[in-house]
Image (cartoon, rainbow, N blue to C red):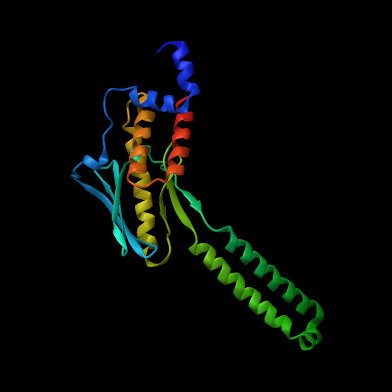
Amino acid sequence: MSPATAEHVLADPDLHHEHIEMESEADPVDPARLEPTRTDARLVHDVGDGQQMLEIFDGSYLRVVTSCPRSAPREFRFDLSFLDPEPKIRSSRGWLRLAVLFAAAAALAAALMLSGGSATVRAAPWLGLAAVAGLAGCMGAALLHRRSRRIVFLTRHGRAPLLALQPVGEGSHGIGEFVARLSSSARDAAATQLYPRAHRLRNEMHAHRRLHEQGALSPDAFEAAKKRILAAHG
């Protein structure tokens, strides 16, 4: 490729995308066409009003099947060498702020009671109720904050959200074990990739395109991931 052509490719993201796809004649492995020979770990957990089955197979691939009562099961597979092995912890900050607000109200009511003594308590019995209510509200909001906690796995360079797990209730121990196994498998899979960097990024672009075609990535998420992969390539 001449310097002028290379400059034109870098200036046009779509051409840059095509350039990545043509850098190697060998097609990347499509996990959907593989016949699993070994299941390394499996997890079934609730997702909304349905269930999701996660399966690590042959040490390097993830299979995800989501079943809902009102629709047909959806399945996608992903090469774990393109998964970031370090999951992100996300939760709703609204419940945390509410817990802090209730705690502050309980502390203020308790401080007024202590500073005024028994006379204040008799004159304003609502202070005791406010302290109890504030403490109960604080505990409830903290619990809801904990229940909103999610473990999110992103793709390596595309930074697209691929998987979200909520370690709450009786299945939290199993989710923790699966998360540890998934992280370990992603590290091992990436370590076996001995291709040149440009080849790996090209294959990662293919992997994201397959996720988009299978409905695992929205159009906006795919476009954002594509731009990040192109930036990593450049």
Quadrant occupied by the N terminus = top left
21 w.r.t. 158: above or below:
above
Q: Is residue 147 above or below residue 183?
A: below
Determine the image quadrant of residue 158.
top left
> In the rendered image of this protein, does residue 38 appear above or below residue 139?
above
* Number of on-image labels: 0
Q: Residue at x 46, y 43 (%)?
A: 220
Q: Is residue 15 visible?
A: yes
> Percent from the top left, x then y, of residue 170?
38, 67
For residue 96, what is the image quadrant?
A: bottom right
Residue sitting at x 20%, y 45%: 36
Which is nearer the eye, 63 or 11? 11
State left or right for residue 171 relative to residue 93.
left
Residue situated in front as seen by the camera: 52 or 55:
52
Of 16 and 231, nearer the camera is 16
Residue 106 found in image quarter = bottom right
**Residue 175 percent coordinates (x, y):** 37, 57
Would residue 197 be visible to someone looking at this image? no
Q: Is residue 88 left or right of residue 26?
A: right
Q: Where is residue 230? Give x, y as percent.
A: 45, 29
213 left or right, relative to 116: left
Which residue is painted at 60% across and 75% down in the image? 136
Image height of 110 relative to 228, above or below: below
